[in-house]
Amino acid sequence: MIMTVLIPLLTGAAINSIRAHDRSALIVYVVAIAVAGVLRLGLSTARRLVAGRVSLGVEVDLRNRLYEQLQRLELGFFDRQQTGQLMSRATVDLQSVRFFLGYGLIFIAQSLLTIALAAVAMFVLQPGLAALALAPVPFVVLIANRYGKHSRPALQEAQQRIAELTAEAEENVSGVRVIKAFAQEERQLDRFKGSVQRVFDQQLYATKIQARYTPMISFLPSLGLALILLVGGRMVIHGSLTIGAFTAFYAYLLMLISPMRTLGYMLSAAQRATASGARIFQILDRSPRITAPAEAPALPDGSGRVTLSGVGLTFEGTSRPALRDIDLDIEAGSTVALVGAMGSGKTALVSLLPRLYEASTGSVRIDGADVRDVDLVSLRRAIAVVTDDPFLFSATVHENIAYGRPDATREEVERAAQVAQADDFISSLPKGYETRVGERGLTLSGGQRQRIAIARAVLADPRILVLDDATSSVDASTEQEIKTALHDVMAGRTTFVIAHRLSTITLADEIVVLEDGRVAAHGSHDELLEESDLYREIVEKGMPDQVFMTRKAAEAVGL
Amino acid sequence: MRLVRFRLRQGRGRARKLRGLIELLAPYRWRVFAMFVALVSATAAALAPAPLAKLAIDDGIRRGDVGALDLIVAAFLVSALVYAVASYAQTYLVGWVGQRALQDLRVKLFTHLQQLSIGFYSRNRAGVIISRITNDVEALDQLVEDGMATLFQSGLTLIGVVVILLVLDFHLALLTFLALPILFAGGVIFRIASADAYRLTREKIAAITGYLQETLSGIRVVRVFGQEPRHIEQFHGLNEENRAANMTTVNLNAIYFPMVEFLSALVTVEILVVGGFEVINGNASTGVVFAFIAALNNFFDPIQQLSQLYTTYQSGMAALDKIFELLDEQPDLVDPPGALDLPPIRGELRFDEVSFQYGVGDDAAYALRDVDLVIPPGQTVALVGATGAGKSTFAKLVARFYDPTSGAVLLDGHDLRSVTANSLRSQMGIVPQEGFLFSGTIRENIAFGRPGASDDEIRAAARAVGADSFIAALDEGYDAEIGERGVQLSAGQRQLVAFARALVADPRILVLDEATSNVDVHTETLIEQGLRRLVAGRTAIVIAHRLSTIRGAGRILVLEHGQVVEDGTHDELLEARGHYWRLYRDWAEQAAA
């Protein structure tokens, strides 16, 4: 920057030497300019390298921190947030911060420095005139301040609407099958157009604010220039100031115009970056609701005894509790079936074990340790959950099965697949265990995904296995084989089964009947048949009819 | 050398892309025109202070002419006012036109995406597609918003200064312009060196978006398996790659831009030496050379700004490349020209020697092979068979998510390929395997297939599938927000809403894919009744698992390895003692156990 100021000075000196017809001086100055040019080349390159590294470093740091924070936040947070919204914060918002740090900050620094240097020079030359010329500066500061107050909320809203648009796009891409199935392309397009229009309106509103304020910021210094011409000019005419002194002074004043304009423009970039930064910190500043205490011990060894005492759960944003007054003591190594109508709290109950949600009242203990007191990762690695609609990552079958234990060997993966009765169909996939599945991969049927998910859970070697309607899309005979195989694997560990099939339920050591978030009955199949009307009704009303008809065709033919 | 040629070629086709951008602006030509007027006025007004000040000093102050001075100061103020007004108009119009064009581009992308087939979506990551609509358009935003004003102001200034230099001293001007070919060559080299780098930055940010999308969608699995540290590590890796890609552009910029600055110092030296010695030797007038050198600064300022813009341009163009890559993706299931709007159908479905392979090539396995059958209107057909037997493929061909590899699927005698997809699907109800719900209220989700549905119709549908009792129990009933993908609901509840959604659409043909697997006994009974009501009078293809559904179906198709091996009613098939009979026997044994 100093070189940028130095070169015009040296040029001026060179011109003076030309005027004086001083060849040697001219050569000296010319060489000095060349040297200054080389120095500027080096310094300016260095400055850009440093600024680039700093801004990229900030971007990387913030994005890493954001992602770490997202991984720390409780699941309840994600229930209320759209994925697209979060994605937008980690990309669009961060880039606007980066852009400003990389370019804007330097321009602002450069402009301010130039203004300061010129102001100092002006005060040295003509203190009175300088005061006059800089008179509008406080107003500039005032206006810039008001501009910020006005513009930041507007820009924050604009970024918010971009995030909404991202969420809208995300949902449309993820749900494209349903949209096409119902031929609702036009309506979705209308909705998207609505989101786009909202972004446009808000951006335009922010632009209007910018258009209103920034010309004022550049207009005020021009007033200073006019004042100086008027007053200084009269001083020269009246002889109280020499023309030379005046032109020198005026030259510095002219130097102010372009940095002032840059400043006006960069201020709006700064506003946008601040608005984006605020949105990023909204997430970073959120304290995770579910955390383990510092230095929390790992889950103590055990075989998976589960104790729930006085447990209640009310999901955020709802008034009706999903669970209330649950007292259960499940012995290690037993198999428990959870039975109940839709919405009776079966899934809510099992989601308390890995502490995905926090019990609103009471306590959940695993092998004697309150889940709130132990390290979350060690707790969750001890529990494996398989749901009815399992999520597979866009990776190979092997990687998906080895998800909980990335270092597992192919042999171990295959063994887990065998337990889940998935080995056969995996072998018949185009590339076997190396076939890509999930998003951008081969589309598997619901039953196939469930079996991979079961293999994934088995390989994780959990102390507690939760099968939440995990075999709903698997045919009956395969389900039976899975259960037999699981029986060996889960010996000495605890299994929770949520199922609607009688064959599954009767296999359990104990059965918990849930009704409206409460334990309605608890006991063995035979006990419950006698004691519980509700259970009897469940059993009698068509339970066997839930059995699947889709047995493996090859076996059915008897090949 | 081949690499250089390759990279040069990458930049080609940009003319077409710029044309594409210009097309976006065409509808707003008057605003664009007004924007140009504002840009020219603002630029002219911005250039005014220096000459006016010179005039004030020369004509007013030096001559002691107070009147002239006042007049010039007035002109000065006017120019400042013009600048303020023009720059207001310019900011507003550039913002308007730029945002409009970008939002239109988003809509264009979105419209195009909707035309692409399901096949496209299974080949590409959702997050990457989303990145095109969001990040890449945002990158263009920077080019449009900063670029237009800079391009204009600097371009106009540059042209003006070139004229001034030529008029002042033709000889010196030519010497100055020696820098231009160097600048141009530098620009080409910069483009070649950076083309890959900028493309890479677009790909890396798309990779980050994709990773975010996937791991946030699967956040439950991540939590359950306690794999946060691993994902954080992988994300750090992607982030590092993104940094590395951007670092290359930073490094290139850090060299390129100061070189331009350096060139300006060299040219100053050149002119000082040549012009200076001419003056000293008496070959040129002092005033001309001084004026020339003074003007020289105005020559390099816009060049520096333009080369700064060039980097933004490179990054914007890389984003545009990616956007056009997507726009160039040809929809493979387009309505043929002259496609028929399917009239209200009776629902007769015919498979005429239909075979289907996923993927291409001779080695691709047949998912369906030589299926030849007729389903009369109103018949309920249950598809039975093992995983991978071809049930889903059968259903997808009916919905025309794919076209058959050979043969034809006909509806009321119309080849599905000859009718518009929209008219087909609006008469078809599909309950997919996963009951994907959209964020919004329950009411909106049920009315998804027929947004005009009345409140009564929505309630009636919910009642028919047995969803009304759980909805009534919610705090806000039908207006309850269900969260993204319906996370606030249980699996069974989601399924019920998906049923109600299909029912409201009142389709002629219904395709049900393994949908009745997640609900409990009570709900099951309700659904069975609801389904019976739903399929009555419609042609229904049901990928069935439950005996009750299968038994209730008018016809059962047993599929194996992509072929129909048995076809008949429950009783007929039992009598035939074939595949179905064996399936049934196995089930009976199991039920007895």
Image (cartoon, coloured by chain):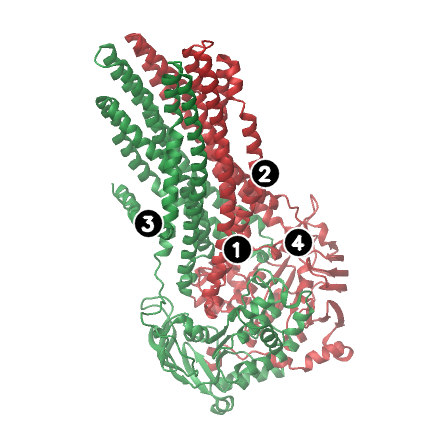
Chain colours: A red, B green
> What is the three-letter code of the residue carrying label 1?
Ala
Mark 3 vs mark 1, foreground winner is 3
Q: Amino acid at mark 4?
A: Leu
Picture coordinates of residue B257, whole percent (x, y) = 37, 31
Which residue is tagged 3? B17
Between discs 1 and 2, the one toward the N terminus: 2
How many C-alpha atoms fall within 10 Å of the one at disc 2: few (<14), some, or many (≥20)?
few
Q: Is residue B385 above or below residue A203?
A: below
Q: CA distance from mark 4 to mark 1?
A: 32 Å
For the residues labelled 4 and 1, say whether their Cβ atoms are less than 8 Å apart.
no
- Do marks 3 and 1 share a chain? no
Q: CA distance from mark 3 to mark 1?
A: 27 Å
The residue tagged with tag 4: helix, strand or loop? helix
Q: Quadrant of the C terminus of chain A?
A: bottom left
Q: Which mark lies nearer to you, 4 or 1? A: 1
Tell me, yes or no, whether the two marked residues, 1 and 2, touch with CB atoms within 8 Å: no
Name the residue nearer the viewer: B526 or B576.
B526
Name the subunit of mark 1. A
Amino acid type, residue under disc 3 in the picture: Lys
* Nearer the observer, A107 or A342: A107
- Mark 4 vs 2, N-terminal side: 2
- Disc 3 vs disc 4: Cβ atoms closer than 8 Å? no
Q: Which residue is mark 4?
A: A379
Residue B26 seen from this side: yes
In the rendered structure, are the residues bearing label 4 and label 2 in contact, judged by CB atoms less than 8 Å apart? no
Q: Which residue is mark 2?
A: A149
**Residue at numbered disc 1:** A167
